[in-house]
Image (spheres, rainbow, N blue to C red):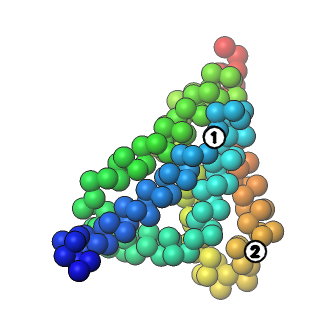
Amino acid sequence: MLYYYFGSKELLYVAALESMYADYAKKEAALDLTGQEPPEAIATLAKSIWAHLWDNPQWLGLINNENFHKGRYLKMSGKLGATISPLVEVVRSTLERGAAAGQFRTGVDPLDFYVTLVGMGYYIASNRFTLHAFTGRDYMEPADRERMSAMHLELLLAYLRPQASEQQR
C-alpha cells in the first residue's frame, strides 16, 4: 500500500529523505539568532548542527548511504533546494550583521561557510568508529565533543575575523 501511495520503493525513500532534511532545516531555522552578537550566533548555530549530527546516527546512515549512491535519490527530489535555502539565509544574514559591525570579514560566501561548518561536525560523527579504531579515542565522549567543538569554533571565528586591510577602513 505504501509503494502504491508513493509510486515506488524509490519514491518512498525520496520522501523519507525529504522529510529528514525538512525536519532538520526546520529545527535549525527555528533558532533565534537575531538577538545574539554575530560570533555568538555562529557558535549557537554550529553547536546545534554538530549536536544534531553527533546525536542522530541514523541520520548519518541515510546521508552516507545516499553519498554511496552518488546522490541518486536526492536528485529525484524537487524539494531540497527549498530545504537548504532558509539555513543558508540564516548564515548569510549573520555574516552580513558581523561584517557590518566590523566583527567579520566581508565577502564570505554563505553556502561555502555553511558547508564547511557542517563538514567539521560531519567528519567526526560519520567517521567515529574508524577514528576510534585508529586513535583509541572516542570522539563521541562528552569531553572530546566539547574539545572538538571549541577547536572548530576557534577555527571558524578566526577565519571570519576581518583582515587587516578591512580593519583600517
Q: How many marks can you see?
A: 2
Q: Residue at x 32, y 66 (%)?
A: 15
- Dot 1 alpha-carbon crowd within 10 angstroms: few under 14, some 14 to 19, many 20 or more: few
Q: Position of residue 152 (x, y in %)?
A: 69, 54
- Dot 2 alpha-carbon crowd within 10 angstroms: few under 14, some 14 to 19, many 20 or more: few
Task: Give the residue at the far right of this rendering.
Answer: 143
Which three-letter amino acid code belongs to the residue tagged 1? Asp
Q: Residue at x 55, y 39 (%)?
A: 91
Q: Position of residue 20 (x, y in %)?
A: 44, 64
| Depth check, front residue: 4 or 156 | 4
Q: Position of residue 32 (x, y in %)?
A: 63, 40
Which three-letter amino acid code belongs to the residue tagged 2? Glu
Give the labeled residue for mark 1.
32
Q: Quadrant of the N terminus?
A: bottom left
Q: Which mark is residue 141?
A: 2
Note whether residue 144 is visible.
Answer: yes
Relative side of 95 to 41, left or right: left
Of the two numbered discs 1 and 2 in the rendering, the one whose residue sits closer to the viewer:
1
